[in-house]
Image (cartoon, helix red, strand yellow):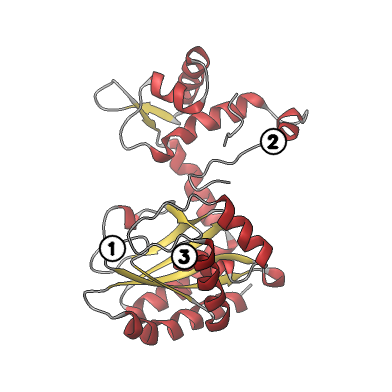
Amino acid sequence: MNRSIISGEDGARPLDQAQMDDPLFVQSIARALHVLSVFHKAEQPLSLNEIAEASGTGRSAAQRVIHTLRALGYIERDETGRGYLPGIRVLDHTVDYLRLNKLIERATPVLLDLRKNARERVDLSLFDDLRVVYAARLQSKRETFFATLVGHSVPTFCTSGGRAIMAHLTDAQVDDIIARSDRRPFTDKTITTPGGVREMVREARQTGYALTVEEVLVGEVAIGVAVLGPGGRPLGAIHVAGSLSEWTPDAFRSRFAPLAVEAANAINRLR
Protein backbone atom coordinates (compact mmCIF):
# COMPACT_ATOMS: atom_id res chain seq x y z
CA MET A 1 0.00 0.00 0.00
CA ASN A 2 1.19 3.53 -0.77
CA ARG A 3 3.06 4.99 2.24
CA SER A 4 1.51 8.44 1.76
CA ILE A 5 -2.00 7.47 2.59
CA ILE A 6 -4.88 9.30 4.03
CA SER A 7 -0.97 16.07 6.73
CA GLY A 8 -0.21 17.49 3.36
CA GLU A 9 -1.60 20.40 1.39
CA ASP A 10 -3.95 18.08 -0.48
CA GLY A 11 -5.33 16.54 2.72
CA ALA A 12 -3.27 13.36 2.43
CA ARG A 13 -1.84 12.34 5.81
CA PRO A 14 1.45 10.48 5.51
CA LEU A 15 1.96 7.48 7.76
CA ASP A 16 5.28 6.03 8.83
CA GLN A 17 6.03 2.32 8.94
CA ALA A 18 5.60 2.14 12.72
CA GLN A 19 2.03 3.43 12.43
CA MET A 20 1.16 0.91 9.72
CA ASP A 21 2.77 -1.95 11.69
CA ASP A 22 0.73 -1.12 14.80
CA PRO A 23 -1.51 -4.15 15.52
CA LEU A 24 -4.48 -1.80 16.01
CA PHE A 25 -4.02 -0.30 12.54
CA VAL A 26 -6.57 -1.71 10.06
CA GLN A 27 -5.03 -1.76 6.59
CA SER A 28 -8.31 -2.37 4.77
CA ILE A 29 -9.92 0.72 6.31
CA ALA A 30 -6.88 2.79 5.39
CA ARG A 31 -7.03 1.49 1.83
CA ALA A 32 -10.71 2.39 1.50
CA LEU A 33 -10.18 5.89 2.83
CA HIS A 34 -7.20 6.35 0.55
CA VAL A 35 -9.37 5.42 -2.42
CA LEU A 36 -11.84 8.09 -1.34
CA SER A 37 -9.03 10.62 -0.93
CA VAL A 38 -8.04 10.44 -4.62
CA PHE A 39 -11.04 12.65 -5.38
CA HIS A 40 -9.51 15.58 -3.44
CA LYS A 41 -7.78 16.91 -6.54
CA ALA A 42 -10.05 15.41 -9.20
CA GLU A 43 -11.70 17.78 -11.68
CA GLN A 44 -13.98 15.17 -13.24
CA PRO A 45 -15.25 11.63 -12.61
CA LEU A 46 -12.45 9.07 -12.32
CA SER A 47 -12.21 5.68 -13.97
CA LEU A 48 -11.28 2.50 -12.13
CA ASN A 49 -7.80 2.60 -13.64
CA GLU A 50 -7.33 6.25 -12.62
CA ILE A 51 -8.43 5.51 -9.04
CA ALA A 52 -6.12 2.50 -8.82
CA GLU A 53 -3.15 4.47 -10.13
CA ALA A 54 -3.76 7.56 -8.00
CA SER A 55 -4.27 5.53 -4.83
CA GLY A 56 -1.31 3.22 -5.38
CA THR A 57 -3.72 0.30 -5.08
CA GLY A 58 -3.76 -2.63 -7.46
CA ARG A 59 -6.61 -2.67 -9.95
CA SER A 60 -8.23 -5.75 -8.44
CA ALA A 61 -8.04 -4.38 -4.89
CA ALA A 62 -9.31 -0.97 -6.05
CA GLN A 63 -12.24 -2.65 -7.78
CA ARG A 64 -13.22 -4.46 -4.56
CA VAL A 65 -12.93 -1.27 -2.51
CA ILE A 66 -15.01 0.69 -5.02
CA HIS A 67 -17.66 -2.02 -5.11
CA THR A 68 -17.93 -1.98 -1.30
CA LEU A 69 -18.05 1.81 -1.10
CA ARG A 70 -20.70 1.91 -3.83
CA ALA A 71 -22.84 -0.56 -1.88
CA LEU A 72 -22.55 1.68 1.18
CA GLY A 73 -23.27 4.89 -0.75
CA TYR A 74 -19.82 6.47 -0.44
CA ILE A 75 -19.01 6.20 -4.14
CA GLU A 76 -21.42 6.38 -7.06
CA ARG A 77 -21.34 6.26 -10.84
CA ASP A 78 -21.44 9.54 -12.71
CA GLU A 79 -24.43 10.23 -14.94
CA THR A 80 -22.70 8.78 -18.01
CA GLY A 81 -21.93 5.52 -16.22
CA ARG A 82 -18.27 5.68 -17.27
CA GLY A 83 -16.68 7.13 -14.13
CA TYR A 84 -16.95 7.35 -10.37
CA LEU A 85 -17.69 10.21 -7.98
CA PRO A 86 -17.98 10.55 -4.18
CA GLY A 87 -21.42 9.44 -3.01
CA ILE A 88 -24.02 11.36 -1.05
CA ARG A 89 -23.23 9.49 2.16
CA VAL A 90 -19.98 11.46 2.42
CA LEU A 91 -22.09 14.52 3.25
CA ASP A 92 -23.49 12.78 6.33
CA HIS A 93 -20.02 12.82 7.88
CA THR A 94 -19.43 16.42 6.85
CA VAL A 95 -22.52 17.61 8.69
CA ASP A 96 -21.59 15.46 11.71
CA TYR A 97 -18.22 17.18 11.90
CA LEU A 98 -19.67 20.66 11.52
CA ARG A 99 -22.47 20.26 14.05
CA LEU A 100 -20.30 18.58 16.71
CA ASN A 101 -17.30 20.90 16.43
CA LYS A 102 -17.45 23.27 19.41
CA LEU A 103 -15.26 25.91 17.78
CA ILE A 104 -17.60 26.17 14.78
CA GLU A 105 -20.59 26.31 17.14
CA ARG A 106 -19.26 29.20 19.22
CA ALA A 107 -17.78 31.03 16.23
CA THR A 108 -20.91 31.04 14.06
CA PRO A 109 -22.87 33.86 15.78
CA VAL A 110 -19.71 35.99 15.92
CA LEU A 111 -19.08 35.40 12.21
CA LEU A 112 -22.65 36.37 11.38
CA ASP A 113 -22.22 39.66 13.24
CA LEU A 114 -18.87 40.25 11.54
CA ARG A 115 -20.39 39.60 8.11
CA LYS A 116 -23.22 42.04 8.87
CA ASN A 117 -20.78 44.77 9.90
CA ALA A 118 -18.12 44.13 7.26
CA ARG A 119 -20.38 43.45 4.26
CA GLU A 120 -17.49 41.50 2.74
CA ARG A 121 -16.73 37.78 2.62
CA VAL A 122 -16.10 36.26 6.04
CA ASP A 123 -14.61 32.79 6.56
CA LEU A 124 -13.61 30.49 9.38
CA SER A 125 -10.75 28.13 8.60
CA LEU A 126 -9.29 25.30 10.67
CA PHE A 127 -5.57 24.59 11.01
CA ASP A 128 -4.42 21.28 9.56
CA ASP A 129 -0.63 21.40 9.41
CA LEU A 130 0.36 22.54 5.89
CA ARG A 131 -3.12 23.74 5.02
CA VAL A 132 -6.10 25.58 6.44
CA VAL A 133 -9.54 24.14 5.71
CA TYR A 134 -12.62 26.34 5.35
CA ALA A 135 -15.32 25.33 7.83
CA ALA A 136 -17.67 28.32 7.39
CA ARG A 137 -18.04 30.72 4.46
CA LEU A 138 -20.31 33.76 4.55
CA GLN A 139 -20.39 35.25 1.09
CA SER A 140 -20.30 38.75 -0.29
CA LYS A 141 -21.83 39.97 -3.53
CA ARG A 142 -19.10 38.56 -5.78
CA GLU A 143 -17.81 35.05 -5.46
CA THR A 144 -16.58 32.14 -7.53
CA PHE A 145 -18.00 28.67 -7.09
CA PHE A 146 -14.99 27.37 -5.15
CA ALA A 147 -15.11 30.35 -2.78
CA THR A 148 -18.49 29.08 -1.54
CA LEU A 149 -17.41 25.54 -0.68
CA VAL A 150 -16.95 24.38 2.90
CA GLY A 151 -14.05 21.92 2.99
CA HIS A 152 -11.97 23.75 0.39
CA SER A 153 -8.39 24.19 1.60
CA VAL A 154 -5.48 26.51 0.88
CA PRO A 155 -1.81 26.38 1.97
CA THR A 156 -0.90 27.67 5.40
CA PHE A 157 2.29 29.45 4.32
CA CYS A 158 0.78 31.98 1.88
CA THR A 159 -2.68 32.80 3.23
CA SER A 160 -3.75 35.46 5.69
CA GLY A 161 -5.32 32.96 8.07
CA GLY A 162 -2.39 30.59 7.77
CA ARG A 163 0.17 33.27 8.58
CA ALA A 164 -1.96 34.53 11.48
CA ILE A 165 -1.89 30.94 12.80
CA MET A 166 1.87 30.63 12.24
CA ALA A 167 2.35 33.81 14.28
CA HIS A 168 1.26 31.79 17.32
CA LEU A 169 3.72 28.96 16.67
CA THR A 170 7.38 28.77 17.65
CA ASP A 171 10.06 29.75 15.15
CA ALA A 172 11.00 26.09 14.82
CA GLN A 173 7.41 25.14 14.01
CA VAL A 174 7.18 27.96 11.46
CA ASP A 175 10.40 26.84 9.79
CA ASP A 176 9.12 23.25 9.67
CA ILE A 177 5.90 24.28 7.91
CA ILE A 178 7.83 26.39 5.42
CA ALA A 179 10.29 23.59 4.70
CA ARG A 180 7.57 20.98 4.08
CA SER A 181 5.23 23.21 2.06
CA ASP A 182 4.88 23.08 -1.69
CA ARG A 183 5.74 26.74 -2.25
CA ARG A 184 4.86 27.00 -5.90
CA PRO A 185 3.22 30.43 -6.41
CA PHE A 186 -0.50 30.88 -7.08
CA THR A 187 0.07 34.33 -8.60
CA ASP A 188 3.07 36.52 -9.34
CA LYS A 189 2.44 38.17 -5.94
CA THR A 190 2.72 34.97 -3.87
CA ILE A 191 5.55 35.24 -1.36
CA THR A 192 7.35 31.90 -1.51
CA THR A 193 10.87 32.46 -0.13
CA PRO A 194 11.45 31.21 3.42
CA GLY A 195 12.76 34.62 4.45
CA GLY A 196 9.77 36.40 2.94
CA VAL A 197 7.28 34.11 4.69
CA ARG A 198 9.09 34.49 8.02
CA GLU A 199 8.95 38.28 7.66
CA MET A 200 5.18 38.15 7.09
CA VAL A 201 4.79 35.94 10.17
CA ARG A 202 6.87 38.37 12.26
CA GLU A 203 4.66 41.22 11.08
CA ALA A 204 1.55 39.25 12.08
CA ARG A 205 3.02 38.72 15.55
CA GLN A 206 3.47 42.45 15.93
CA THR A 207 0.08 43.58 14.59
CA GLY A 208 -2.15 40.68 15.73
CA TYR A 209 -3.32 39.93 12.19
CA ALA A 210 -1.95 39.00 8.76
CA LEU A 211 -2.63 40.86 5.51
CA THR A 212 -2.21 39.26 2.07
CA VAL A 213 -2.59 40.99 -1.28
CA GLU A 214 -3.23 38.86 -4.38
CA GLU A 215 -1.18 35.96 -3.05
CA VAL A 216 -3.79 33.30 -3.78
CA LEU A 217 -6.36 35.08 -5.97
CA VAL A 218 -5.65 37.96 -8.34
CA GLY A 219 -7.60 41.03 -7.22
CA GLU A 220 -8.18 39.84 -3.66
CA VAL A 221 -7.02 41.40 -0.41
CA ALA A 222 -7.56 39.49 2.84
CA ILE A 223 -7.01 39.84 6.57
CA GLY A 224 -6.66 36.84 8.88
CA VAL A 225 -6.71 36.64 12.68
CA ALA A 226 -5.98 33.47 14.63
CA VAL A 227 -8.57 31.72 16.77
CA LEU A 228 -6.96 30.15 19.82
CA GLY A 229 -7.54 27.15 22.05
CA PRO A 230 -6.30 26.32 25.54
CA GLY A 231 -2.79 27.56 26.22
CA GLY A 232 -2.90 29.88 23.24
CA ARG A 233 -2.65 27.02 20.74
CA PRO A 234 -3.94 28.16 17.32
CA LEU A 235 -6.96 26.18 16.15
CA GLY A 236 -7.82 28.17 13.06
CA ALA A 237 -8.46 31.68 11.84
CA ILE A 238 -11.16 34.05 10.73
CA HIS A 239 -10.73 35.90 7.44
CA VAL A 240 -12.23 38.98 5.87
CA ALA A 241 -11.66 39.19 2.10
CA GLY A 242 -12.41 41.97 -0.36
CA SER A 243 -11.69 43.17 -3.87
CA LEU A 244 -8.87 45.50 -4.91
CA SER A 245 -11.33 47.07 -7.33
CA GLU A 246 -13.02 48.59 -4.27
CA TRP A 247 -10.25 48.82 -1.69
CA THR A 248 -6.59 49.74 -1.48
CA PRO A 249 -4.63 47.44 0.85
CA ASP A 250 -4.14 50.25 3.38
CA ALA A 251 -7.83 51.23 3.36
CA PHE A 252 -8.84 47.58 3.72
CA ARG A 253 -6.44 47.14 6.62
CA SER A 254 -7.72 50.26 8.39
CA ARG A 255 -11.38 49.33 7.95
CA PHE A 256 -11.35 45.59 8.68
CA ALA A 257 -8.36 44.73 10.86
CA PRO A 258 -10.03 46.11 14.03
CA LEU A 259 -13.29 44.28 13.22
CA ALA A 260 -11.51 40.98 12.57
CA VAL A 261 -9.36 41.24 15.70
CA GLU A 262 -12.43 42.07 17.81
CA ALA A 263 -14.33 39.10 16.36
CA ALA A 264 -11.45 36.68 16.98
CA ASN A 265 -11.09 37.93 20.57
CA ALA A 266 -14.82 37.40 21.08
CA ILE A 267 -14.54 33.78 19.88
CA ASN A 268 -11.48 33.22 22.08
CA ARG A 269 -13.32 34.50 25.15
CA LEU A 270 -16.13 31.98 24.58
CA ARG A 271 -13.95 28.89 24.94
Q: What residue did someone put label 3 on?
A: 124
Q: CA distance from mark 3 to mark 1?
A: 21 Å
Label 2: few (<14), some (14–19) or many (≥20) C-alpha neighbours in 10 Å: few
Instruction: Give, as a three-letter code, the residue at label 3.
Output: Leu
Residue at 45%, 68% in the rendered image:
160
Measured from the top left, where is residue 247 in percent x and y? Answer: 27, 80
Instruction: Give, as a three-letter code, the residue at label 2.
Output: Asp
Measured from the top left, where is residue 85 in percent x and y? Answer: 36, 31
Considering the numbered disc 2 on the image, is that residue within a helix, a strand or a loop? loop
Q: Nearer the viewer, mark 3 or mark 1?
A: 1
Q: In this rendered view, identify the residue nearer to me: 154 or 99.
A: 154
Q: CA distance from mark 3 to mark 2?
A: 31 Å
Q: In this rendered view, identify the residue nearer to me: 165 or 150.
A: 165
The answer to whether residue 70 is visible is no
Q: What residue did someone put label 1 on?
A: 218
Instruction: Give, as a three-letter code, the residue at label 1.
Output: Val
- Indicate which disc residue 16 carries: 2
Label 1: few (<14), some (14–19) or many (≥20) C-alpha neighbours in 10 Å: some
Of pointers 3 and 2, the one earlier in the residue sequence? 2
Residue at 43%, 25% in the rendered image:
51
Q: CA distance from mark 1 to mark 2?
A: 38 Å
Q: Is residue 188 left or right of residue 5?
A: left
